[in-house]
Image: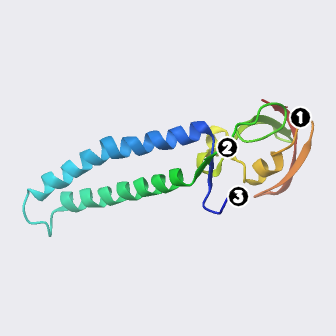
């Protein structure tokens, strides 16, 4: 049974998070640690902007590392749905009064609306889950309730 900490991901989404974590730990963190050390060598730290800036950046990076580690620890890679039923990983084309739009259904962490990747828990994503071509779905949007028809699923 999933708890509220579960992070639903596609296999590709998990790989992307693992790659980001690896890059932060193996590459970017080392660069910032060197900046901290170099700035520390300049002497008086009380007014050393470079030192304080590098420390701040290191803190932000370490926070992101902790976030990624927690997400991966709670990650549940969902099987990509195959066939004509909308599920995680499906590419869905929907039509409404504004025309056709195509989206990939992903977990919340992978969502990127501008990139055509919508979360399975977003209003549209949730309305599409489990539905098939020809189904009409209603969902809430900032402009009110909208209706769309599923044109294709792959």
- What separation in Å lies between label 1 and label 3 (alpha carbons)? 30 Å
Where residue 91 sits, quadrant-wise, is top right
Q: Position of residue 2 (x, y in %)?
A: 68, 58
Q: Earlier in the sequence, mark 2 or mark 1?
A: 2
Q: Nearer the viewer, mark 2 or mark 3?
A: 3
Q: Secondary structure at mark 1?
A: loop
Could you tell me which residue is drawn at 19 percent across and 48 percent down?
34
Q: Is residue 100 visible?
A: no
Reading the image, the residue beneath label 1 is 133
Reading the image, the residue beneath label 2 is 78
- What separation in Å lies between label 2 and label 3 (alpha carbons)? 13 Å
Q: Position of residue 144 (x, y in %)?
A: 82, 59
Could you tell me which residue is drawn at 62 percent across and 56 percent down?
6
Q: Quadrant of the C terminus?
A: top right
Q: Earlier in the sequence, mark 2 or mark 3?
A: 3
Q: Which mark is residue 1?
A: 3
Could you tell me which residue is drawn at 13 percent across and 66 percent down?
45
Q: Secondary structure at mark 2?
A: loop
Relative height, residue 85 to residue 60 (above, below): above
Could you tell me which residue is drawn at 71 percent across and 36 percent down?
80
User: How crowded is the residue under tag 1: few (<14 C-alpha within 10 Å), some, or many (20+)?
Assistant: some
Disc 2, disc 1: CB below 8 Å?
Answer: no
Relative height, residue 140 to residue 25 (above, below): below
Q: Report the side of 94 relative to 39 (left or right).
A: right
Q: Is residue 29 visible?
A: yes
Q: Which mark is residue 110?
A: none
């Amino acid at each position: 049974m999933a708890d509220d900490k579960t992070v639903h991901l596609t296999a590709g989404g998990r790989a992307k998070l693992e790659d980001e974590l690896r890059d932060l730990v193996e590459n970017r963190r080392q660069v910032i640690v060197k900046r901290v050390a170099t700035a520390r060598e300049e002497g008086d730290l009380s007014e050393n902007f470079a030192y304080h800036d590098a420390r701040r950046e290191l803190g932000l990076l370490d926070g992101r590392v902790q976030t990624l580690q927690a997400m991966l620890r709670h990650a549940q890679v969902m099987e990509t749905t195959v066939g004509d039923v909308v599920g995680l990983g499906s590419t869905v084309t929907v039509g409404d009064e504004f025309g056709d739009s195509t989206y990939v259904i992903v977990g919340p962490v992978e969502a990127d609306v501008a990139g055509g990747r919508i979360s399975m828990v977003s209003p549209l994503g949730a309305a599409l889950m489990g539905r098939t071509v020809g189904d009409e779905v209603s969902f809430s949007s900032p402009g009110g309730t909208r209706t769309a028809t599923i044109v294709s699923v792959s």
